[in-house]
Amino acid sequence: MSELTVIVPCKNEEEAIPLFYDELVKNTGFLEKRNTGLKVLFIDDGSDDGTVSAVRALNEKDPRVHLISFSRNFGKEAAMYAGLKAADSDFAVIMDADLQDPPALLEEMFSYIDEGYDSVATRRVTRKGEPPIRSFFARRFYKVMKKLSDTEIMDGARDYRLMTSQFITAVRSMTEYNRFTKGIFGWVGYETKWIDFENVDRSAGKTKWNFWGLVMYSLEGITAFSTKPLVMSSLIGIIFCFIAFVMTVFIVVRRAVFGDPVDGWASLMTVIVFLGGVQFFCTGILGQYIAKAYLEVKDRPLYLKNEKNCF
Ligand code: UDP
Ligand code: MG
């Protein structure tokens, strides 16, 4: 008999958890037919509401429900990693607690696994119900990412993905501190089937993302999966050297031929200020990568468990 682990990262999801559980159980009846057992692994990512007691209540009536609880909020990336690390099953799937990743797709996803795929990934084709400004920047991010990175990151990709043990082992072997799971999934390769679905609104509770959170997440994605910004800053340097050379020739010739009426303070200042800006910008890019390297070198754990709330 094989086993499926459903990994559910939760930050303050006490209202959503019972709804999620009911919906999941309703949609996993097919597992029995294919002789696959079910394990539901909630990850409490430092919630300060009743998330732990909501999961405990489920565990009392259904022993297939388990919980890993963190000592504080470490972020969804860490929660997904903790889940995959604990999943010693043949299959694992990551799902949001808010039912934005419809459990109804699971049966179809399994049919592709049975065809021989190593992972089945999902993608939202609409962003209905999302603030337009957020959709706009999300789209831009995926466009920029496509240009900057060799690793494929699909527009609208969710973390909702069904994986075989081979795929799980591969993702688990990537222990980096600055995690960007969407990129990691693409990086490990293997045969992946993509399924499209329409955006679904949150079942209960509120989204944990704000605009700045998403901006930082995008920067994380770029620095984690591309070093092209560094190349770009070198290129900018070369371009400015060339411009400076042309200007030098121009100014020297003008001085020699026409003499030198001393003015041009305004244009000189503009150039100095502009170049100062470009330099800070490029140093900033460099700084981002050094900061990431610094955090990796420290090799801190990705999360800490609060053992008394783990079962
Ligand atoms: N989440 C988490 N840790 C965090 C933020 C979010 O584990 O620090 C979980 C959250 O409980 C949910 C999933 O990640 O199950 C997706 O979060 P959310 O619905 O807020 O994101 P959105 O769907 O709006 O992108
Ligand atoms: Mg959500």
Image: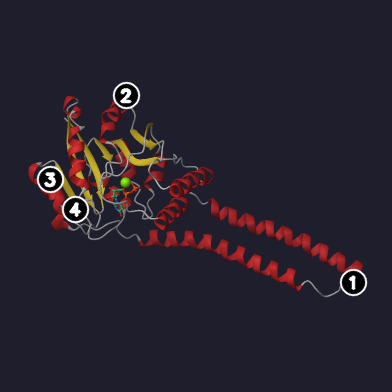
* Residue 187 sits in quarter: top left
Q: Which residue is mark 1?
A: 259
Image quarter where the N terminus lies is top left
- Label 1 element class: loop
| Amino acid type shown at disc 1 | Gly
Q: Earlier in the sequence, mark 4 or mark 3?
A: 4
| Residues at marks 3 and 2, CA–CA distance in whole angstroms | 33 Å
Q: Residue at x 17, y 38 (%)?
A: 22
Q: Is residue 19 left or right of residue 251?
A: left
Mark whose residue sits in front, 3 or 2: 3
Image disc number at residue 202: none
Mark whose residue sits in front, 1 or 4: 4
Q: Earlier in the sequence, mark 3 or mark 1?
A: 3
* Residue 109 sits in quarter: top left
Q: Residue at x 48, y 59 (%)?
A: 289
Q: Which residue is mark 2?
A: 115
User: CB under 8 Å between callouts 4 and 3?
Assistant: no
- Label 3 element class: helix
| Amino acid type shown at disc 3 | Leu
Q: Earlier in the sequence, mark 1 or mark 4?
A: 4
Determine whether 163 is above or below 115 in the image: below
